[in-house]
Image (cartoon, helix red, strand yellow):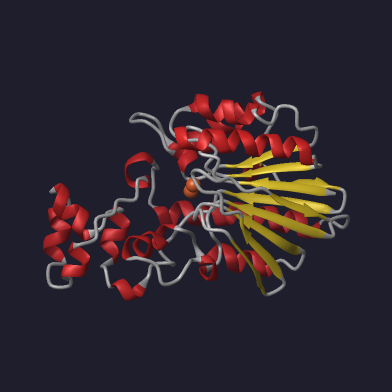
Amino acid sequence: MRILATADLHYDIRRSRKSAEALARRVRQTGGDVLVLVGDTAGVRLEPMREALRLFADFPGLRLLVPGNHCLWCREGEDSLDRYHRVLPSLAAEEGFFVLDHRPQVLGEVGLAGSVGWYDYSMIEPELGIPEDFYRAKISPGAARYLGTHEDLLERHAEALTERHMQLGVRWMDGRRVRLPFDDDAFCARLAARLDRQLQTLQARGEVRRIVAFLHHLPFIEQVPADRPDRFAFAAAYLGARRFGELLLAYPKVSHVYCGHSHWKDSRRIGRLEVVNIGSTYVDKHLEILDL
Ligand SMILES: [Fe+2]
Ligand SMILES: [Fe+2]
Protein backbone atom coordinates (compact mmCIF):
# COMPACT_ATOMS: atom_id res chain seq x y z
CA MET A 1 0.00 0.00 0.00
CA ARG A 2 1.47 3.31 -1.05
CA ILE A 3 0.21 6.58 0.39
CA LEU A 4 1.27 9.90 -1.16
CA ALA A 5 0.85 13.12 0.79
CA THR A 6 1.52 16.73 -0.10
CA ALA A 7 0.31 20.04 1.37
CA ASP A 8 0.19 23.79 0.87
CA LEU A 9 -0.07 23.79 -2.91
CA HIS A 10 -1.54 27.34 -2.67
CA TYR A 11 -2.58 27.10 -6.29
CA ASP A 12 -4.33 30.49 -6.11
CA ILE A 13 -0.95 32.17 -5.63
CA ARG A 14 0.99 32.84 -8.79
CA ARG A 15 4.41 31.90 -7.48
CA SER A 16 3.08 28.54 -6.30
CA ARG A 17 1.63 27.34 -9.56
CA LYS A 18 4.71 26.06 -11.37
CA SER A 19 5.96 24.03 -8.43
CA ALA A 20 2.45 22.65 -7.78
CA GLU A 21 2.28 21.50 -11.40
CA ALA A 22 5.73 19.90 -11.12
CA LEU A 23 4.57 18.15 -7.94
CA ALA A 24 1.52 16.81 -9.77
CA ARG A 25 3.81 15.37 -12.48
CA ARG A 26 5.83 13.67 -9.76
CA VAL A 27 2.67 12.20 -8.25
CA ARG A 28 1.76 10.82 -11.67
CA GLN A 29 5.20 9.22 -12.11
CA THR A 30 5.35 7.84 -8.58
CA GLY A 31 1.86 6.29 -8.51
CA GLY A 32 0.14 5.03 -5.40
CA ASP A 33 -3.03 3.74 -3.81
CA VAL A 34 -3.97 6.97 -2.02
CA LEU A 35 -3.17 10.64 -2.51
CA VAL A 36 -3.88 13.11 0.28
CA LEU A 37 -3.66 16.90 -0.09
CA VAL A 38 -3.10 18.13 3.46
CA GLY A 39 -4.61 21.60 3.27
CA ASP A 40 -4.10 25.06 1.77
CA THR A 41 -4.71 23.75 -1.73
CA ALA A 42 -6.12 27.20 -2.64
CA GLY A 43 -7.78 30.22 -1.03
CA VAL A 44 -10.83 32.46 -1.31
CA ARG A 45 -11.52 31.84 -5.00
CA LEU A 46 -12.93 28.39 -5.79
CA GLU A 47 -11.73 28.15 -9.37
CA PRO A 48 -8.02 27.69 -8.44
CA MET A 49 -9.10 24.95 -6.02
CA ARG A 50 -10.89 23.17 -8.84
CA GLU A 51 -7.88 23.63 -11.14
CA ALA A 52 -5.55 22.26 -8.48
CA LEU A 53 -7.68 19.13 -8.00
CA ARG A 54 -7.73 18.64 -11.76
CA LEU A 55 -3.93 18.41 -11.77
CA PHE A 56 -4.45 14.97 -10.22
CA ALA A 57 -7.35 13.87 -12.43
CA ASP A 58 -5.44 10.87 -13.78
CA PHE A 59 -4.20 9.61 -10.40
CA PRO A 60 -5.60 6.08 -10.35
CA GLY A 61 -5.95 5.65 -6.57
CA LEU A 62 -8.18 7.15 -3.92
CA ARG A 63 -7.98 10.97 -3.85
CA LEU A 64 -8.51 12.71 -0.53
CA LEU A 65 -8.09 16.16 0.88
CA VAL A 66 -8.30 17.95 4.17
CA PRO A 67 -8.97 21.68 3.98
CA GLY A 68 -6.43 24.18 5.24
CA ASN A 69 -7.21 27.49 6.89
CA HIS A 70 -6.75 29.19 3.49
CA CYS A 71 -9.39 26.85 2.03
CA LEU A 72 -11.85 28.27 4.59
CA TRP A 73 -11.15 31.90 3.65
CA CYS A 74 -14.20 33.54 2.14
CA ARG A 75 -15.69 36.80 1.02
CA GLU A 76 -18.01 39.02 2.99
CA GLY A 77 -21.45 37.49 3.08
CA GLU A 78 -20.04 33.96 2.84
CA ASP A 79 -19.49 31.64 5.77
CA SER A 80 -16.42 29.47 6.45
CA LEU A 81 -18.54 26.81 8.12
CA ASP A 82 -20.65 26.52 4.98
CA ARG A 83 -17.41 26.19 2.97
CA TYR A 84 -16.26 23.45 5.26
CA HIS A 85 -19.46 21.42 5.41
CA ARG A 86 -21.02 22.00 1.99
CA VAL A 87 -19.05 23.98 -0.62
CA LEU A 88 -15.69 22.17 -0.44
CA PRO A 89 -17.09 18.62 -0.19
CA SER A 90 -19.34 19.17 -3.21
CA LEU A 91 -16.58 20.80 -5.28
CA ALA A 92 -14.20 17.99 -4.28
CA ALA A 93 -16.75 15.32 -5.25
CA GLU A 94 -17.17 16.93 -8.68
CA GLU A 95 -13.41 16.50 -9.20
CA GLY A 96 -13.16 12.95 -7.85
CA PHE A 97 -11.89 13.81 -4.35
CA PHE A 98 -13.34 13.14 -0.89
CA VAL A 99 -12.91 15.50 2.04
CA LEU A 100 -11.41 13.21 4.66
CA ASP A 101 -12.72 15.36 7.54
CA HIS A 102 -16.23 14.28 6.73
CA ARG A 103 -15.66 10.53 6.53
CA PRO A 104 -12.73 8.34 7.55
CA GLN A 105 -11.59 5.79 4.99
CA VAL A 106 -10.45 2.18 5.26
CA LEU A 107 -8.16 0.60 2.69
CA GLY A 108 -7.28 -2.97 3.51
CA GLU A 109 -5.65 -2.90 6.93
CA VAL A 110 -5.11 0.86 6.98
CA GLY A 111 -7.52 3.45 8.35
CA LEU A 112 -7.23 7.06 7.23
CA ALA A 113 -8.45 9.91 9.43
CA GLY A 114 -8.27 13.63 8.79
CA SER A 115 -9.02 17.12 10.00
CA VAL A 116 -8.23 20.68 9.10
CA GLY A 117 -7.18 20.92 12.78
CA TRP A 118 -7.20 24.45 14.19
CA TYR A 119 -5.68 26.60 16.92
CA ASP A 120 -6.85 27.27 20.44
CA TYR A 121 -3.96 29.49 21.63
CA SER A 122 -2.27 26.61 23.40
CA MET A 123 0.86 27.25 21.32
CA ILE A 124 1.36 30.92 22.19
CA GLU A 125 5.05 31.73 22.75
CA PRO A 126 5.07 32.91 26.39
CA GLU A 127 8.53 34.45 26.13
CA LEU A 128 7.12 37.22 23.91
CA GLY A 129 4.84 38.40 26.73
CA ILE A 130 2.11 39.76 24.45
CA PRO A 131 -1.37 39.79 26.08
CA GLU A 132 -3.64 37.05 24.73
CA ASP A 133 -6.25 39.59 23.60
CA PHE A 134 -3.97 40.57 20.72
CA TYR A 135 -3.60 36.98 19.58
CA ARG A 136 -7.35 36.54 19.62
CA ALA A 137 -7.74 39.77 17.62
CA LYS A 138 -5.12 38.29 15.21
CA ILE A 139 -3.02 41.41 15.25
CA SER A 140 0.27 42.31 16.95
CA PRO A 141 0.50 45.49 19.04
CA GLY A 142 2.79 47.20 16.50
CA ALA A 143 0.41 46.45 13.62
CA ALA A 144 -2.55 47.76 15.64
CA ARG A 145 -0.74 51.02 16.29
CA TYR A 146 0.46 51.35 12.69
CA LEU A 147 -2.99 50.67 11.25
CA GLY A 148 -4.77 52.79 13.86
CA THR A 149 -7.08 49.94 14.88
CA HIS A 150 -7.83 48.11 18.16
CA GLU A 151 -7.38 51.25 20.24
CA ASP A 152 -9.30 49.59 23.07
CA LEU A 153 -6.72 46.78 23.27
CA LEU A 154 -3.77 49.16 23.11
CA GLU A 155 -5.31 51.21 25.90
CA ARG A 156 -6.28 48.27 28.10
CA HIS A 157 -2.82 46.72 27.92
CA ALA A 158 -0.75 49.91 27.76
CA GLU A 159 1.27 49.00 30.84
CA ALA A 160 2.18 45.52 29.61
CA LEU A 161 3.28 46.63 26.14
CA THR A 162 6.99 47.14 25.49
CA GLU A 163 8.95 48.69 22.63
CA ARG A 164 9.64 45.17 21.37
CA HIS A 165 5.88 44.54 21.12
CA MET A 166 5.35 47.85 19.35
CA GLN A 167 8.05 46.98 16.80
CA LEU A 168 6.17 43.85 15.83
CA GLY A 169 3.92 44.37 12.81
CA VAL A 170 2.03 41.14 12.11
CA ARG A 171 -1.55 40.35 11.18
CA TRP A 172 -2.85 36.80 10.95
CA MET A 173 -5.07 36.99 7.90
CA ASP A 174 -7.57 34.39 9.14
CA GLY A 175 -8.80 37.34 11.21
CA ARG A 176 -10.10 39.01 8.07
CA ARG A 177 -10.83 36.02 5.87
CA VAL A 178 -12.24 33.28 8.10
CA ARG A 179 -15.86 33.95 9.01
CA LEU A 180 -17.19 31.64 11.70
CA PRO A 181 -20.30 31.97 13.85
CA PHE A 182 -18.23 31.23 17.00
CA ASP A 183 -14.71 31.72 18.33
CA ASP A 184 -11.59 29.67 17.62
CA ASP A 185 -11.88 27.66 20.85
CA ALA A 186 -15.38 26.54 19.96
CA PHE A 187 -14.38 25.67 16.38
CA CYS A 188 -11.35 23.80 17.65
CA ALA A 189 -13.46 21.84 20.15
CA ARG A 190 -15.93 20.83 17.41
CA LEU A 191 -13.14 19.71 15.11
CA ALA A 192 -11.43 17.76 17.87
CA ALA A 193 -14.73 16.00 18.68
CA ARG A 194 -15.11 15.06 15.00
CA LEU A 195 -11.59 13.67 14.80
CA ASP A 196 -12.14 11.81 18.07
CA ARG A 197 -15.20 10.10 16.54
CA GLN A 198 -13.21 9.14 13.44
CA LEU A 199 -10.39 7.65 15.51
CA GLN A 200 -12.87 5.79 17.72
CA THR A 201 -14.56 4.28 14.67
CA LEU A 202 -11.28 3.21 13.07
CA GLN A 203 -9.79 1.94 16.33
CA ALA A 204 -12.87 -0.26 16.86
CA ARG A 205 -12.76 -1.87 13.41
CA GLY A 206 -11.11 -5.29 13.66
CA GLU A 207 -9.61 -5.29 10.16
CA VAL A 208 -7.85 -1.96 10.73
CA ARG A 209 -4.31 -2.67 11.94
CA ARG A 210 -3.03 0.89 11.84
CA ILE A 211 -4.32 4.43 11.40
CA VAL A 212 -2.63 7.19 9.44
CA ALA A 213 -3.87 10.71 10.28
CA PHE A 214 -3.69 13.90 8.22
CA LEU A 215 -4.10 17.30 9.89
CA HIS A 216 -3.42 20.64 8.27
CA HIS A 217 -2.57 22.39 11.56
CA LEU A 218 0.04 21.05 13.93
CA PRO A 219 -1.00 18.77 16.78
CA PHE A 220 2.27 18.92 18.72
CA ILE A 221 4.16 21.88 20.21
CA GLU A 222 7.39 19.99 19.42
CA GLN A 223 6.73 20.71 15.75
CA VAL A 224 6.82 24.46 16.28
CA PRO A 225 10.24 25.77 15.28
CA ALA A 226 12.08 27.36 18.21
CA ASP A 227 14.37 30.43 18.27
CA ARG A 228 12.81 32.24 15.35
CA PRO A 229 12.39 35.98 14.80
CA ASP A 230 9.56 37.65 16.73
CA ARG A 231 7.15 37.73 13.80
CA PHE A 232 7.34 33.90 13.54
CA ALA A 233 7.16 33.52 17.31
CA PHE A 234 3.92 35.58 17.26
CA ALA A 235 2.53 33.35 14.49
CA ALA A 236 3.19 30.21 16.57
CA ALA A 237 -0.16 30.95 18.27
CA TYR A 238 -1.91 30.01 15.02
CA LEU A 239 0.07 26.89 14.16
CA GLY A 240 -2.07 24.38 15.97
CA ALA A 241 -3.59 22.99 19.12
CA ARG A 242 -2.11 20.54 21.61
CA ARG A 243 -5.45 18.84 22.17
CA PHE A 244 -5.18 17.17 18.75
CA GLY A 245 -1.83 15.67 19.74
CA GLU A 246 -3.34 14.30 22.95
CA LEU A 247 -6.12 12.71 20.90
CA LEU A 248 -3.75 11.08 18.43
CA LEU A 249 -1.64 9.63 21.24
CA ALA A 250 -4.74 8.20 22.91
CA TYR A 251 -5.52 5.78 20.08
CA PRO A 252 -2.96 2.95 19.93
CA LYS A 253 -3.51 2.13 16.26
CA VAL A 254 -2.37 5.58 15.08
CA SER A 255 1.15 5.17 13.72
CA HIS A 256 1.76 8.11 11.37
CA VAL A 257 0.65 11.75 11.32
CA TYR A 258 1.12 14.14 8.38
CA CYS A 259 0.71 17.91 8.65
CA GLY A 260 1.28 21.08 6.64
CA HIS A 261 0.53 24.73 7.44
CA SER A 262 3.85 25.90 8.96
CA HIS A 263 5.70 25.50 5.64
CA TRP A 264 8.49 24.07 7.77
CA LYS A 265 9.87 20.62 6.91
CA ASP A 266 10.13 18.45 9.98
CA SER A 267 10.02 14.80 10.86
CA ARG A 268 10.15 13.35 14.35
CA ARG A 269 9.00 10.55 16.59
CA ILE A 270 6.57 11.51 19.36
CA GLY A 271 5.74 8.54 21.56
CA ARG A 272 4.97 5.74 19.10
CA LEU A 273 3.99 8.21 16.35
CA GLU A 274 5.97 9.12 13.28
CA VAL A 275 5.05 12.79 12.84
CA VAL A 276 5.87 14.46 9.55
CA ASN A 277 5.44 18.06 8.57
CA ILE A 278 5.41 17.95 4.79
CA GLY A 279 6.98 21.40 4.66
CA SER A 280 5.89 22.71 1.26
CA THR A 281 6.53 26.43 0.91
CA TYR A 282 5.00 28.84 -1.61
CA VAL A 283 7.70 28.05 -4.16
CA ASP A 284 8.89 24.59 -3.23
CA LYS A 285 6.46 21.67 -2.95
CA HIS A 286 7.24 18.40 -1.23
CA LEU A 287 5.86 14.91 -1.69
CA GLU A 288 5.87 12.34 1.10
CA ILE A 289 5.70 8.66 0.18
CA LEU A 290 4.60 6.11 2.77
CA ASP A 291 4.84 2.45 1.80
CA LEU A 292 3.09 0.20 4.30
FE1 LIG B 1 -0.01 27.17 3.79
FE1 LIG C 1 -2.31 26.88 6.54
* Above or below, comparing residue 10 to residue 51 in the picture: below
Residue 251 image point, x, y percent = 71, 66
If the image is split into quadrants, where does the C terminus sit? bottom right
* Above or below, comparing residue 85 to residue 93 in the picture: below
Nearer to us in this view, 186 or 147: 147
Q: Report the residue at 44% width, 38% height from top.
A: 80
Quick check: can you spot residue 250?
yes
Residue 209 image point, x, y percent = 85, 60
Residue 192 lies left or right of residue 171; in this view the side is right
Residue 272: quarter of image: bottom right
Q: Report the residue at 51% width, 48% height from top.
A: 281
Q: Report the residue at 38% width, 61% height from top.
A: 232
Quick check: can you spot residue 13?
no
Q: Report the residue at 21% width, 69% height from top.
A: 164
Residue 8 lies left or right of residue 105; in this view the side is left
Residue 74: quarter of image: top left
Nearer to us in this view, 2 or 217: 2
